[in-house]
Image (cartoon, grey):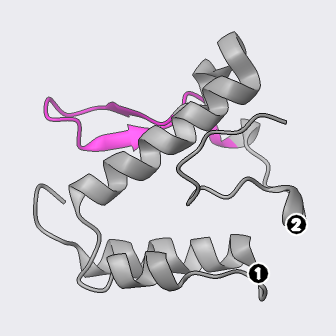
């Protein structure tokens, strides 16, 4: 994803995004932005917004949940500071934050 749009990443991202949004969600803007694939700028923007929402909601407790680069020297590996056994997906329905919002909100 080093400056070149990646169609595969866009397809996978949109599938997960649509699953979170559900049937009533509006993904037109995101789908249009990813029409040619996901580029590094899109990824970094979403990562920054998500980490900002975690910072607002969890304060100092956010560290294990933040998306961070790691691994290779140019940051090709990204992930969270939790092991696979520490992660559980829970369907929270409409209570999930909208990551498309430019404004960070707290609950």
Secondary structure of the residue carrying tag 2 is helix
Taking the spot 23% from the left edge, 43% from the top edge, the residue there is: 76
Looking at the image, which residue is at 11% across and 67% down? 4
Q: Which residues are magenta?
A: 67-84
Looking at the picture, how far across and down is residue 5, in whole percent? 18, 71
Task: Residue 73: say if magenta.
Answer: yes
* Contact between labelled residues 2 and 1, with CB atoms less than 8 Å apart: yes
Q: Position of residue 48 (x, y in %)?
A: 44, 39
* Any part of residue 15 in sight: yes
61 relative to 98, above or below: above
Residue sitting at x 44%, y 51%: 46
User: Mark 1: few, some, or many residues within 10 Å (few <14, many ≥20)?
Assistant: few
Taking the magenta stretch, the answer to whether it contains residue 52 is: no
Q: Quadrant of the N terminus?
A: bottom left
Q: Toward which corner of the image does residue 107 lie, by quadrant?
A: top right
In the picture provided, is 96 more to the left or to the right than 54?
Answer: right
86 displayed left or right of 79: right
Give whichever of 37, 24 is nearer the camera: 24
**Which residue position holds label 2?**
93
Q: Is residue 91 visible?
A: no
| x and y percentages locating residue 32 in the rendered image | 38, 84
Task: Give the residue at x 71% y 80%.
Answer: 25
- The first of marks 1 and 2 along the sequence is 1
In the displayed structure, 2 sits above or below 60; it is: below
- How many numbered discs, if any? 2
Q: What residue is shown with label 1?
A: 22
Percent position of residue 28, x then y: 51, 85
Outermost residue on the top side: it is 60
């Amino acid at each position: 994803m080093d400056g070149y749009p990646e169609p595969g990443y866009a397809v996978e991202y949109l599938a997960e995004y649509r699953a979170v949004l559900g049937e009533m969600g509006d993904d037109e803007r995101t789908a249009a932005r990813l029409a040619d694939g996901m580029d590094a700028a899109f990824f970094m923007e979403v990562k920054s917004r998500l980490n900002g929402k975690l910072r607002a909601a969890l304060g100092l407790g956010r560290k294990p949940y933040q998306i961070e680069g790691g691994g290779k020297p140019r940051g090709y590996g990204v992930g969270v500071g939790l092991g696979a056994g520490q992660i559980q997906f829970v369907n929270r329905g409409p209570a999930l934050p909208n990551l498309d919002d430019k404004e960070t909100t707290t609950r």
